[in-house]
Image: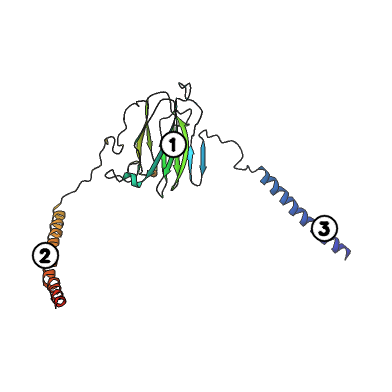
Amino acid sequence: MRRNVVLILLFCLGLVGTILMQESTLAQEMAVIPVPLKGASKVRMRHRMDMDGMVMNENKDRLPFGCKEIAADVHFTVHAGRKYARQFNGKMFAYDQQEWNVKPCSRVTIKFVNDDHIRHQFMIHGLLPYLYPPTGMFHIEVSGPGTKTASFIVSSEPTTHLVHCELAQHTEHGMKAQLKVGDGDGDLSSIPGLTAAETPDYYPIDWTMDRLAILGGTGLFGLLLIFVLYKWSSVVIQPTLRNDRSTNSN
Ligand SMILES: [Cu+2]
């Protein structure tokens, strides 16, 4: 009897020991798992991001080489939305303005207002890559109706910068503009209402015999419908009106 009790006690002690060793091993393994949010990012571009949108590569104070000081503090309010494209045939999205001009070495502050219920961007290219890594781009994005404000500093060289919304098809459908530093270095193509397209849109109609027959048939059907309505009104409506008038006069 005493021997059985000892055996049961030894079994229980072994079981508890095994469980404690497993938990200890698990704790050690968890301790070496790196916490994803710790440590410095190796990506040099700067993001400011929340659920309403983002700003990439904001720069309020770092001067480009060639600029001794901020030459001017320029503020623009830029609206983006479908209603601004109504003035341009065939376009669906646009900014409320298609060109901005600033002096070299200006600090440009953009208050970007999205008037639509979809995402839009103010993305500018061709800035100095060492200030706007990795490709010389600054951008503001607003996820829906709302506003975000951010600044960047342009170089001392006369340059024409592309401004656009990079969401799929938004540039092609009209959300494209240009920002000129000084006199710029030319004009970009396909700026709505400003410059001609290198490859203009065209909507060809392939006039086959089938299509001509359908067009002619629908035209004749329209004429017939007008004739029938005219006859129906002269037979049914006009006599009824005459009867009503004579009844009222009596
Ligand atoms: Cu857009």
Label located before the other in sequence (3 or 2): 3
Q: Residues within 10 Å of mark 1 (few under 14, many from 20)?
A: some
Circle 1 residue: 110
| Front: mark 3 or 1 | 1
Q: Position of residue 155 (x, y in %)?
A: 43, 25
Q: Residues within 10 Å of mark 3 (few under 14, many from 20)?
A: few
- Label 3 close to label 1 by CB (< 8 Å): no
- Identified at 71% across, 48% down, the residue is 25
- Label 3 close to label 2 by CB (< 8 Å): no
Circle 2 residue: 227
Q: Position of residue 2 (x, y in %)?
A: 88, 64
> Which quarter of the picture shows residue 165?
top left
Image check: 4 left or right of 15?
right
Q: Nearer the viewer, residue 177 or 3?
A: 177
Circle 3 residue: 10
Picture disc at residue 152? none
- Looking at the picture, which amino acid does disc 3 mark? Leu
> Which quarter of the picture shows residue 161?
top left
Q: Position of residue 167 (x, y in %)?
A: 39, 43
Q: Nearer the viewer, residue 216 or 186?
A: 186
